Amino acid sequence: MNKNIVKIMAAAAALLMTAFPVAAAEEDIMTDNSKTLVVYFSHTGNTKSIAERIAAAVPADIVRIETVTPYTGSPNEVSAQGKREVDSGYRPAIKPLGVNPADYDRIVIGTPTWWYTMAPAVATFFDTVDLSGKDVVLYMTNAGWPGHVIKDMTAAAKGADVIASKEILFDSNGGNRMITPAAEIDEWIAGWK
Ligand SMILES: Cc1cc2nc3c(=O)[nH]c(=O)nc-3n(C[C@H](O)[C@H](O)[C@H](O)COP(=O)(O)O)c2cc1C
């Protein structure tokens, strides 16, 4: 009798041991199925740092938008070039992303504010990608003059469902010091991830 009880307990233990790895594997598969891509442009690193924060928390694949011709001038020169490009609606050519946004369910798009709107390179990205049916998260960094970036990005994300957005403030001198508290950003990410 005791031997039978031992046998039953051993069988139950074996079952439990196999059940748990199976549950863990299923969870992994679920995570892999819901794929998130973070796409960002960044000239001086601020928008990049937020992209990396998001990609670490979600998790997500991460890719940087790069213009074929890099912005190489002094801060004043890039500022003036940016103004000319924004004012004229110029769309700089961008390098291939190396990933296919169609492979992702959710796409996070980040831009610095350039003359109250998204950077022209990000406008090029919107022009070249089909976001219809995707969940999209938008964020922008700025130096105190946020303008209408999120509104413009929302309009550019044609057919997408914008599930969250965030304006993130950096140093008003154009530096890398983040003014928006990190905890506020983490809370925002936790709200949609
Ligand atoms: C061409 C250019 C235009 C900018 N225009 C604005 C603006 O209109 N409003 C603002 O708050 N900051 C503006 N900035 C500052 C950047 O948006 C801010 O420093 C941002 O965090 C930079 O992001 P990045 O480091 O990822 O390039 C501008 C910067 C550049 C280079």
Image (tube, rainbow, N blue to C red):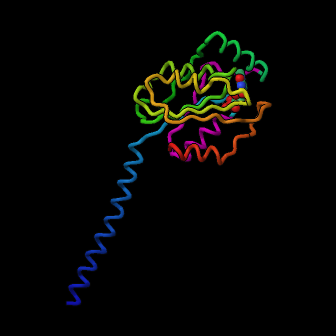
Quadrant containing ligand 1:
top right
From this view, report whether residue 10 is shown above or below residue 28: below
Which residues, given as a range, are shown in magenta?
Answer: 46-73
The image quarter in which residue 149 lies:
top right
Q: Quadrant of the N terminus?
A: bottom left
In the figure, is residue 125 to the left or right of 170? left
* Residue 124 position in % (x across, y down): 55, 19
Image point 79% across, 20% down: which residue?
Answer: 76
Q: Position of residue 31 (x, y in %)?
A: 42, 48
Magenta stretch: includes residue 29:
no
Q: How many marks?
A: 0
Q: From what the image shows, is residue 8 above or below residue 192?
A: below
Residue at image coords 56%, 46%: 56
Give 14 or 95, whichever is nearer the viewer: 14
How far across and down, in percent of the image, does residue 61 sit? 50, 39
Q: Nearer the viewer, residue 53 or 113?
A: 113
Q: Locate residue 124 relative to residue 34 in the image: left or right.
A: right
Pick the front one: 145 or 69: 145
In percent of the image, x 62 and y 29: which residue is there? Answer: 111
Check residue 58 for magenta coloring. Answer: yes
Residue 175, quarter of picture: top right
**How far across and down, in percent of the image, does residue 167 sit?**
64, 34
User: Which residue is at a point 63% across and 39% down the rendered structure image?
Assistant: 50
Left or right of 37, for residue 86: right
